[in-house]
Image (cartoon, rainbow, N blue to C red):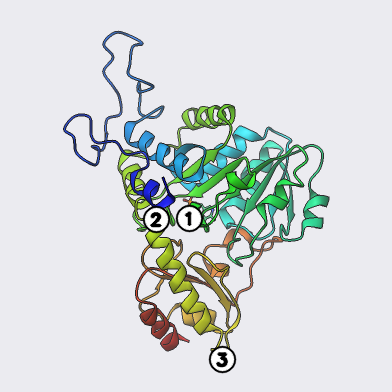
Amino acid sequence: MRFATRAVHAGLEPDPGYGGVVPAIHQASTYVQPAPGEFREDYDYSRSANPTRSALERALGELEGGLASAFSSGMAAEHALITAVASAGAHVVIPDDLYGGTYRLVDKVLTRWGLEYTMVDQTDLDAVERAVRDDTALIWVETPTNPTLKVVDVGEIVARRRSAFVAVDNTFATPVFQRPLDLGADAVVHSTTKYLGGHSDAVGGAVIVADAARHEAVRFVQNSVGAVPGPLDCFLVHRGLRTLPLRMAAHSENARAVSEWLRGVDGVRDVRWPGFSGMVSFRHDDAVRIASSTRVFSCAESLGGVESLIEVPQAMTHQSVEGSAAAVPADLVRLSCGIEDAQDLIEDLAQAV
Ligand SMILES: *Cc1c(COP(=O)(O)O)cnc(C)c1O
């Protein structure tokens, strides 16, 4: 089946109890065992497995082309993957333009367990080659990058991996536009809070890996650490997946229209849109005033919902990278273009600018 068809049906079988076309939300924390140690499939306790979560995991795996584990947030997913792949003292390579929380996890938490890291501009392949060592355990890729929307060639990074595991944060692109496992990466990470959920009503994350043994290692951390999403959040993200191709087409079209318009506006510099998805950035001396003056665009952190958001990364999402190599300029504005009418988005920005 083609992608849009799979997006609608992935992970969903009619409810075995009553035949509902959408299965019930399994809120139960535990399952009756007819005799001690006897239970259906792997359902003995809901931290270990839950049918609503399993349905979402099957769907995520199908859309990215691998084996998925769902988490309570994107950060929990990142933490699980890094701890499944790297040990104390390991060397990892991270981008010099990345989600602030990823930098904070590596720099403020994991370095306390001896993790060593090198930051590099991953669009500079010679620099990547110099950063990767024989003992590098993990190369963390984010593309397009957050917030400056640089596009990294995943295949070229894989070609320079030596023996490192390659993980790609696919939150901005989604599997509609980029399937990192098909490009040779070992793992994909998502903040499902963003485009996959798509309605700004659930926080969640996912890891999808190609290899079955790695999948078991990630699931082992998932169960051991326990940062699992609740059934209702799984249901909401799964429902979001069903309209993902339609929403991504609308996000892209609006971002194209908004970025084209911005390029002709006085005082607006360095307009960026990678050519797909709904994220746009630009620079303007009055960044803070503009982000405080829009009416359709809400000034808020996060992205990827049906409603448009505006933010100033330096003052909002990227506080944790201040003073590091990943610091962002104060005049940068980031837009998450929603699925409203493009003309309303442009008129809103026009009155604000
Ligand atoms: C939001 C985000 C994360 C973190 O996800 P949470 O669900 O907020 O924990 C990671 N990577 C990127 C690119 C993000 O935008």
Q: Please tell me which of labels 1 and 2 falls first in the chain.
A: 1
Are the two marked residues, 1 and 3, in contact with CB atoms closer than 8 angstroms?
no
Query: Which quadrant holds residue 181?
Result: top right
| Residue that mark 2 sits on | 244
Mark closer to the observer (3, 2): 2
Q: Nearer the viewer, residue 301 or 70?
A: 70
Q: Could you tell me which secondary element the residue under label 3 belongs to? A: loop
Q: Is residue 188 left or right of residue 352?
A: right
- Give the distance between the C-alpha atoms of the residues marked 1 and 2, in whole angstroms: 8 Å
- Residue 115 visible here: yes
**Residue at the extreme bottom:** 266
Q: Nearer the viewer, residue 298 or 57?
A: 57
Q: Nearer the viewer, residue 95 or 317?
A: 95
- Going by the numbered disc 1, the residue's amino acid type is Val
- Residue at figure coordinates x 50%, y 27% from the top left: 224
- Residue neighbourhood size for the residue with mark 1, other residues' Cα within 10 Å, grouped as few (<14), some (14–19), many (≥20): some
| Residue that mark 1 sits on | 176
Q: Could you tell me which secondary element the residue under label 2 belongs to? A: helix
Q: Could you tell me which secondary element the residue under label 1 belongs to? A: helix
Q: Position of residue 80 (x, y in %)?
A: 55, 37
Mark closer to the observer (1, 3): 1
- Give the distance between the C-alpha atoms of the residues marked 3 and 2, in whole angstroms: 35 Å
- Give the distance between the C-alpha atoms of the residues marked 1 and 3, in whole angstroms: 34 Å
**Above or below, 214 relative to 110:** above
| Residue that mark 3 sits on | 266
- Residue neighbourhood size for the residue with mark 2, other residues' Cα within 10 Å, grouped as few (<14), some (14–19), many (≥20): many
**Residue at the extreme left:** 18
Query: Which quadrant holds residue 244?
Result: bottom left
